[in-house]
Image (cartoon, rainbow, N blue to C red):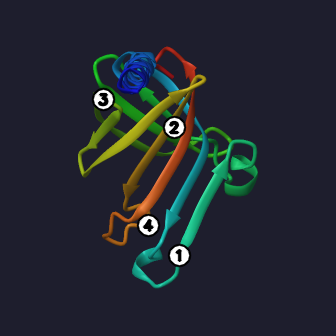
Amino acid sequence: MLLGIFAIWACRREADKTAEAAKPDLKVVMPGTWAATYLNVKMPTYQSGDTSEVFEASEEYWEAKYQVKPYRTYFDGEQKFRTVFRGVRGDVFGEAKGIWNVFGDTLVMIEPDKTVQYKVLIDKGMAHFSALLDWDQDGKEDDEFYAIFRQVSKSSAE
């Protein structure tokens, strides 16, 4: 009986090690150009009120519904990033710049006025980002952010 329990424990430990080894190193994977394909933000206290709000955008409806292109983030190998927001005609209407670093499965993006930590899971060529942040700018980091990105280029240049 004890030998059976030990065998199960040893197999489980080996499976955990294999799964951990299969996780890609984010410092190696992140450099390049990533395009948003899906975005969902749940805001439980929308603008400090007692109402909740959900913002959702998917690749196929981004332009038609919001009149913008899915945003792109450019991560370079020297740990600098730039996120570009474009209108449907390609005109840039917003940009964020900063530095990035990785700690295990956490991607830290530092801009001059804020720092955000995302848990990142790479699965089938897609990067799944999740974080608690202040999306609605009400002073509370209580908004559940979830986004999926596709790497569209290994280059970080536009």
Kindly report the distance in space between the C-alpha atoms of the residues bearing marks 3 and 1: 32 Å
SS assignment at label 2: strand
| Residue corresponding to mark 1 | 52
Q: Would residue 89 be found to the left or right of residue 83 on screen? A: right
Of the residues shown, which amino acid type is indicated by label 4?
Asp
Q: Would residue 25 be found to the left or right of residue 150 on screen? A: left
Residue at (68, 41) in percent of width and height: 89
Residue 127: mark: none
| Residue corresponding to mark 3 | 104
Kindly report the distance in space between the C-alpha atoms of the residues bearing marks 1 and 4: 11 Å
Q: Earlier in the sequence, mark 3 or mark 2?
A: 3
Residue 128: mark: 2
Cβ atoms at labels 2 and 4 below 8 Å apart: no
Residue at (38, 15) in percent of width and height: 28
**Residue 44 drawn at (x, y percent):** 47, 72
Q: Earlier in the sequence, mark 3 or mark 1?
A: 1
Of the residues shown, which amino acid type is indicated by label 2?
His
Cβ atoms at labels 2 and 1 below 8 Å apart: no
Residue at (28, 43) in percent of width and height: 111
**Residue 75 drawn at (x, y percent):** 40, 25
Kindly report the distance in space between the C-alpha atoms of the residues bearing marks 3 and 2: 15 Å
**Residue 17 drawn at (x, y percent):** 37, 19
| Residue corresponding to mark 4 | 136
Cβ atoms at labels 3 and 1 below 8 Å apart: no
Q: Looking at the image, is mark 2 or mark 4 nearer the viewer? A: 2
Kindly report the distance in space between the C-alpha atoms of the residues bearing marks 2 and 1: 23 Å
Relative to 3, residue 135 above or below: below
